[in-house]
Every structure is written in C-alpha cells, then in structure tokens.
Image (cartoon, rainbow, N blue to C red):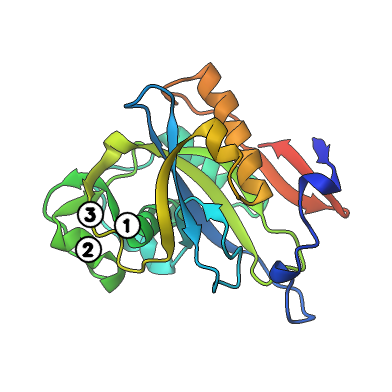
C-alpha cells in the first residue's frame, strides 16, 4: 500500500464538496480510456466538462458516468475476458458477475452518449432501453472482449458526488462507428486525442493523472494490453489517500 501526500490529491476543492452534511455512498460508475496508436505514440481521448457541471466543472476527463441497473441486461456481441471479469468482481465491495458486466457496459454507453463512439461489432441490435437506441439505429452490437481494467478509484468523502469508478481501456480499433456530430448528450466539449504525456499536463483531476501514470507503466510492460494485470485501487482509508493493488 502506498500513502499519497495531500498535495497529490486536491481534497479541499470547494466546488466538489458535498452541500449536505450527511454521508454520500459511492455509486458504481465506469470511465473508458480510448487509446489510439495510429500516429506512433499512444494517444488518449479526452473531453472538457462544461463549467455548469457540479462535479469537476471545466476539467478534461475520459468519457464515463454512473452505471444504470438496466445496462446489465443489454445483449452483447462478446463477453468480458474471464480474467477481466474476475478483476472487476474482486476487491472491497465485491460485486456479482452480472453487476461487473453492467459496469463495463455503462462505460461503453457513456462513450457513445458523450463522444459519439460506438464500441462493438456491426450487426442487428434491438434496444430494450432507449439509452441504447443509438446502437440499434446504427446496427452496432456492443462488445466487451477488448476492455481492460486499468484502475479503480472511490471519490473521497465530502464531495458533492461520490463514485466507485472502474477505469477501463479499449483501442480505437474496437470502435465500430464514429459519429461526426458527436454524442447525443453533448456533455463533453473540445474532444481531443492527446499523447499520454501531454494529457498528464492538461487541466485534469488528480485521480486522472494518477491513472494515466498507471496506464503508461502498464503500456511499457504490455504495449498491446493483451494480458490482465493487478489493479491499482485508490481510496481514502483512516484519513489517508492510498494506492493499493487488487
């Protein structure tokens, strides 16, 4: 376990402090780190959150958001790699395989909604939930086999929103369709593909910077992210922000 200094994590950002005195339980969420190596150095997709957002306004982030229970009932073209499913299931607050699948699918859904990128395979898809109608309209079946778990982080207490976020990665080659007009929610603006070292210097949340460092180290050891690896897990414990491996 590694204890991180307070200056490593901005715990006093007034814009992110909870407005209610009661404790907030973290909600399951997924963030998708899309990777592109077509121009040599690996680049990541990021977008700026609107200033009107209560949570991390104006910051560059990866597409992502809260898991909806119905995400787990979506038909898929391929399942999670067994090792990745095991990684998602393990750790504190252990979840079921069905919940792990829902978390992974929420990352795919949010990437479509916020960035207009549909991860999957061409084919007939019937959307039982209107949130997935875009996949049906464009004949894309969501696929999970290419996802890799890069990190997990729980938002510290005292924030206006708290999430138990799984940071997943996928390659741009896993994207079946890129919509030029972007996603339907338009939650992210200034979508850009940045080399990892440049992304680390952007206006990003500190946890995003930590995860990019984890990603960079993993890519150095496994450039294709072909194998599973221990998951860095960030959380507050006994008033200290720590990083441990699951």
Q: Secondary structure at mark 1?
A: helix
Residue 197 lies in what quarter of the image? top right
Give the residue furthest to the bottom.
20
* First in residue order: circle 2 vs circle 1: 1
Q: Distance from label 3 to label 2 (Cα)?
A: 14 Å
Whether 3 is drawn above or below 135: the answer is above
Quadrant where the N terminus is found in the figure: top right
Q: Nearer the viewer, residue 111 or 1?
A: 111
**Alpha carbon of mark 2 to alpha carbon of mark 1: how far?**
8 Å
Residue at screen point 67% across, 55% down: 154
Give how far across and how far down residue 96 sits, in percent: 51, 54
Relative to 64, is 172 above or below?
Answer: above
Marks 2 and 1 in Cβ contact (< 8 Å): yes
Tell me whether the residue at label 3 lies in contact with that at label 2, contact meaning CB atoms closer than 8 angstroms: no
Mark linked to residue 134: 2
Q: Nearer the viewer, residue 107 or 38?
A: 38
């Amino acid at each position: 376990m590694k204890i991180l200094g307070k200056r490593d994590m901005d715990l006093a950002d007034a814009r992110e402090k909870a407005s209610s005195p009661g404790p907030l339980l973290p909600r399951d969420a997924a963030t998708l780190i899309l990777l592109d190596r077509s121009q040599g150095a690996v680049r990541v997709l990021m977008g700026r959150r609107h200033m009107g957002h209560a949570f991390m306004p104006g910051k560059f982030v990866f597409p992502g958001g809260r898991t909806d229970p119905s995400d787990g009932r979506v038909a898929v073209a391929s399942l999670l790699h067994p090792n990745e499913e095991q990684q998602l299931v393990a750790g504190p607050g252990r979840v079921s395989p069905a919940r792990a699948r829902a978390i992974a699918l929420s990352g795919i859904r949010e990437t479509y909604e916020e960035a207009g990128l549909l991860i999957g395979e061409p084919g007939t898809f019937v959307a039982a939930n209107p949130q997935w109608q875009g996949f049906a309209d464009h004949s894309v079946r969501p696929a999970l086999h290419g996802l890799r778990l890069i990190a997990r982080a729980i938002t510290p207490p005292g924030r206006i929103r708290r999430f138990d976020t799984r940071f997943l990665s996928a390659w741009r080659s896993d994207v079946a369709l890129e919509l030029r007009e972007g996603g339907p929610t338009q939650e992210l603006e200034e979508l850009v593909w940045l080399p990892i070292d440049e992304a680390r210097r952007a206006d990003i949340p500190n946890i995003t910077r930590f995860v990019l460092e984890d990603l960079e180290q993993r890519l150095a050891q496994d450039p294709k992210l072909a194998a599973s690896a221990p998951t860095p897990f960030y959380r507050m414990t006994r008033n200290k922000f720590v990083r441990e491996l699951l």
